[in-house]
Image (tube, rainbow, N blue to C red):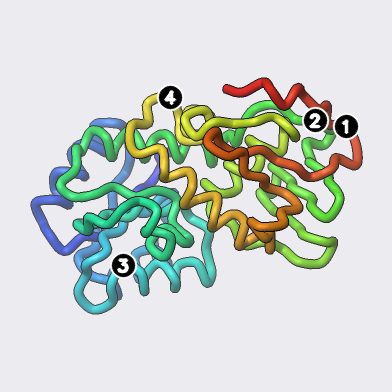
Amino acid sequence: MSTQRVLVVDDEPKIRMTVRGYLEADGFQVVEAADGPSGLRAVAQNRPDLVVLDVMLPGLDGFQVLRRIRQSSQVPVIMLTARTEEVDRLIGFTNGSDDYVTKPFSPRELALRVRAILRRTDNGPGGAPDDDGTLRFDGLTADPATRTVVIDGDHTAELSALDFDLLVAMARAPGRVFTRRGLLTQVWGEDFFGDERLVDVHIRTLRRALRDDANAPRFVGTVRAVGYRFIGRPTQGVPTPNPRDTP
């Protein structure tokens, strides 16, 4: 297996040096960029497996860089931010990103999140309901092999790697109620620690990508005071568990 490459885009040399040290100690190859334009060039030239992207960058800020990356790539992106707003107000921030870390941060925590995201995108959630692994529901088809989701047969949903894994984790057990902590453990990994409301942010971006109305959902339902469940109707091969089975 080839060494995975991580691009770190941050204008503070000390942060880049510290993050590089932890990531290289974990066996990753690290590429650095100090501003938005050079970060975009590094994405095109180095084809990284994951990008660590600061929000406050000269030239182009992290939001602008992320939008341009998403025009041509679904590479996982972890955002670094010094902002202190509540997690549920970070919907614009996380739109298109796979995770975020708030400064000041633990380099070890960041390295763990990098590894967890790359592990997910390499392998995807385990188990497959159909012989070819495809999940088929009325109005929605998800293919873990190609990591694509098609809505109503003609619209390809644009999902981040993390939002795709969130969808598949729920869709593989339609009707099952997932707590926020259960989804964090299953999708983000057992080593994740942080605010459970991060799940709410990603559910919003997932629903928007699926054209799903939270007030009259077709696919992702809310279980008040508990969490979420996938409510799409399977067209084949998916067992329906007891809705009371709540991780």
* SS at circle 4: loop
Q: Which amino acid does label 3 sit on?
A: Gly
Q: Could you tell me if the residues under marks 2 and 3 are in contact, i.e. CB atoms within 8 Å?
A: no
- How far apart are labels 3 and 4 at the CA level? 28 Å
How many marks do you count on the picture? 4
Question: Which residue is at the front of the view, 81 or 2?
Answer: 81
Answer few, some or many: residues within 10 Å of disc 2's Cα (few below 14, many 20 plus, some between 14 and 19). Answer: some
State the residue lying farthest toward the right: 236
Q: Could you tell me if the residues under marks 1 and 2 are in contact, i.e. CB atoms within 8 Å?
A: yes
Q: Earlier in the sequence, mark 4 or mark 2?
A: 2
Q: Residue at x 40, y 53 (%)?
A: 88
* Residue 141 falls left or right of residue 57: right
- How far apart are labels 4 and 2 at the CA level? 24 Å
Location of residue 37 by image quarter: bottom left
* SS at circle 2: loop
- How far apart are labels 1 and 2 at the CA level? 6 Å
Q: Which mark is residue 190?
A: 4
Percent x, y of residue 91 = 43, 60
Question: Which residue is at the front of the view, 82 or 76?
Answer: 82
Q: Residue 141 carries which label?
A: none
Q: Residue at x 55, y 50 (%)?
A: 203
240 to 89, vertically: above or below: above
* SS at circle 3: helix
Residue, disc 2: 129
Q: What residue type is labelled 2?
A: Pro
Q: Which mark is residue 237?
A: 1
Q: Which of marks 2 and 3 is nearer the N terminus?
A: 3
Q: Residue at x 28, y 72 (%)?
A: 61
Q: What residue type is labelled 4?
A: Glu
